[in-house]
Every structure is written in C-alpha cells, then in structure tokens.
Amino acid sequence: MRKVILTGDRPTGRLHIGHYVGSLRRRVELQNAGEFDDIFIMIADAQALTDNADNPEKVRENVIEVALDYLSVGLDPSKSNLFVQSAISELTELTFYYMNLVTLARLERNPTVKSEIQMRKFENSIPVGFLTYPISQASDITVFKATHVPVGEDQEPMIEQTREIVRKFNSTYGEVLVEPKIMLSENKACLRLPGTDGKAKMSKSLNNCIYLSDTSEEVRKKVMSMFTDPNHIQISDPGQVEGNTVFTYLDAFIKEDSFEKYLPEYKNLDELKDHYRRGGLGDVKIKKFLFAVLEDELNPIRERRHQYEQDIEGVYKILEQGTNNARKVAEKTLAEVKDAMKINYFDDKELIKAQAEKYKNQ
Ligand code: TRP
C-alpha cells in the first residue's frame, strides 16, 4: 500500500519550538528518510478562519510566516508538497458530504474542541464552522488518502474522528477512503512542551513562547528568565528536576554530542540531573547550557529562514506549485467519492441508459 503523509498547521502566528519538537522535526526526518510515496504539508488557512472570521488579515499575513517556518526547518519543496488549504475547493465539497455522517453530539464530545471553546469564551455563540472543523480536518486527511498524520498530541481526537468518518463512509458507500494513523513523538518531553513560564502550553497570548524565528538575543533573554524550581534559591540547595522547565527543554532538545560540545564535565543528562537534585548546581549554569543546546538547533533554521526571506516571491511560487500538485490528487479522490455516492450523473452512462429505458417502456 502507498504510504502518504498529510499534516498541517493553522496560520495564526509564527511557529514556535513547541511545534518544532512536537511535530516539525519529525516531519523533516520522515521526509528525508524517503520512505513515503507522497508528503503533503498544509497551511490550514480555512481552518484558521473558523475562529478568526473577523480577522482575515491576521490569517493572510501568517500564511507566509508559516511557509517560511516550514522551509527554514528543512521541509524541502522537491520532496514535500507545501500547499494552502483554501485554494483546494474539493476540501470544502468533501466536508459537506462528510457532515451527513457525523452527529452533533459526536462533535460536542471532542475534548480538544471543547477546551478551545472554553479558551475562546464562545459560550453560547459557537460558530458552526468552528464546531465542525474536525469534519473538515477529516477531508484534509482523506482527500490525500493519507496513511500517516504526524501531529501534536492535541490533534488525537481529530484523527479518531477521521477514522470514524472513513469507516462510516466505506461501509455506507464502498471502500474508497483510507484510515489514517497518528504519529506522535516518542519523547514525552516533546509531546507538550511547556511555556518558558512553566505553564502547561506555549501560547502567544501568554507570551511564553520561543519562536523559531526569534533572534539569538531574544532566545537568550527568554532562557535566562525561564521558570525553574522556585525552591532552589541558593546554589547549594537541592533542586527539583520534575516540572523544571529548563530540564524539560533539555529532555526535548539534548543531542548525543551536546555535553561533549558545551558541558564536558558531565557525561549525560542523568549526571546533570543528579547533581541538581543533590544541590550545588546553579540555575545560571544549566540555563547557559540549555541556551547553547537550543542555539545549536536554531542557528541553521535561522540561516535558512534568512535566505528564504530574501525571496518571498519564490516562496509564494513554492506554495502555488505545491497547491497545484495537491489539487490534482484532491480532484481524483473527490471523483471517486462522488462515484461511490452515486452523485456522478453525467459520467454515469449506465444511469442515463437505465433511466432512458425506464421511460421508453412506459
Ligand atoms: N488542526 C491543526 C492545527 O491546529 C491544523 C490542521 C488542519 C491539520 N487540518 C489538518 C493537522 C489535518 C493535521 C491534519 O494546527
């Protein structure tokens, strides 16, 4: 069976290092491993509009930001199709048909959507488009017959919903769609990287994110003021590693050679953690180490971003090309779907003949 990846992000802001360890880094590895027949990476502008209907300007500006972030982490347009959701009308059409396969009660149970509704204080004025975005996400995935969806943990309910839609569609109309699998990071620290303030999630409104496009100086400041163990006051005090943001980030970012390069007096992260727990290891030292480790990863990303920033027209061309490739696949699947649903009247010669016969014999 063909192996296909579809994934994407809402363009509501620049991407941060939580996106990076949660999914972007993995996408690049998968792309470069060359084991997939097709890779589609989508900028989900239509989904972004489901809760930003009054702010299309924000979405529009962030389309290029997300494209730059994608390219800068190493997504390669010769291997992955980078495309824009709203430019593929087949997605909307498919969503309309899938809507008949999902109940309102099922939508209201989606835990990610539920918490988003709370966060956005929609209360009794939930936009219909917002409540139904998991259905549109099922279209995004299935129109490409994606088998693998590398995303962050919060997207799990969407993939589950998609699988249900696929099963319902296939059992009602015939085997057309493919059930996708979610691909989550195996590193626990990467599943939900906390904000620099130690809060559960990085979020623009909490001002606790490190962006992939931050300058070195911005990253340094954010790391140096990062939340650690509030009870670790003197260097000699024993410190706590669990829930200590610096250590969580180290868990997410550490590499084979990080100690050798930047902190050779320790062999590995366990040794460093033990020392911190015992006492005698200061926050400044671990923060400086973390900064070096982060910079190691962020520097090449920054450099690549800088190059692409010099050729914005070229970046739009990349998106246009990726979108054209994606559309061809979407058109094909939609035709199969309509065939299966028997709403392909003009292509169905059998139907026309049968109807004609029926009236002839009357
Ligand atoms: N919901 C994703 C996000 O919040 C974006 C997205 C839209 C997506 N369609 C998708 C992700 C399909 C994976 C597959 O960023």
Image (cartoon, rainbow, N blue to C red):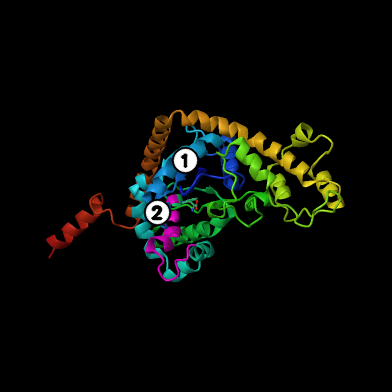
Would residue 176 be visible to someone looking at this image? Answer: no
Q: Residue at x 48, y 64 (%)?
A: 117
Relative to residue 2, is residue 111 depicted above or below? below
Of mark 1 and mark 2, the one earlier in the sequence is 2
Q: Type of residue at label 2? A: Leu
Relative to residue 352, is residue 327 depicted above or below? above
Q: Position of residue 310 (x, y in %)?
A: 46, 28
Q: Position of residue 264 (x, y in %)?
A: 82, 34
Q: Quadrant of the C terminus?
A: bottom left
Position of 185 with respect to 339 (left or right) is: right
**Of residues 274 and 328, the one drawn nearer to the viewer in this rendering:** 274
Which residue matches tag 2?
49
**Of residues 313 and 336, the one drawn nearer to the viewer in this rendering:** 313
Residue occupying the far front of the picture? 234
> Residue 65, which numbered label?
1
Position of 223 with respect to 323 (left or right) is: right
Q: Residue at x 57, y 43 (%)?
A: 211
Q: Position of residue 296 (x, y in %)?
A: 67, 34
User: What is the spatial separation of the Cα atoms under label 1 and label 2, in whole angstroms?
Assistant: 16 Å
Q: Type of residue at label 1? A: Glu
Magenta region, residue range: 120-140
Would residue 137 be visible to someone looking at this image? Answer: yes
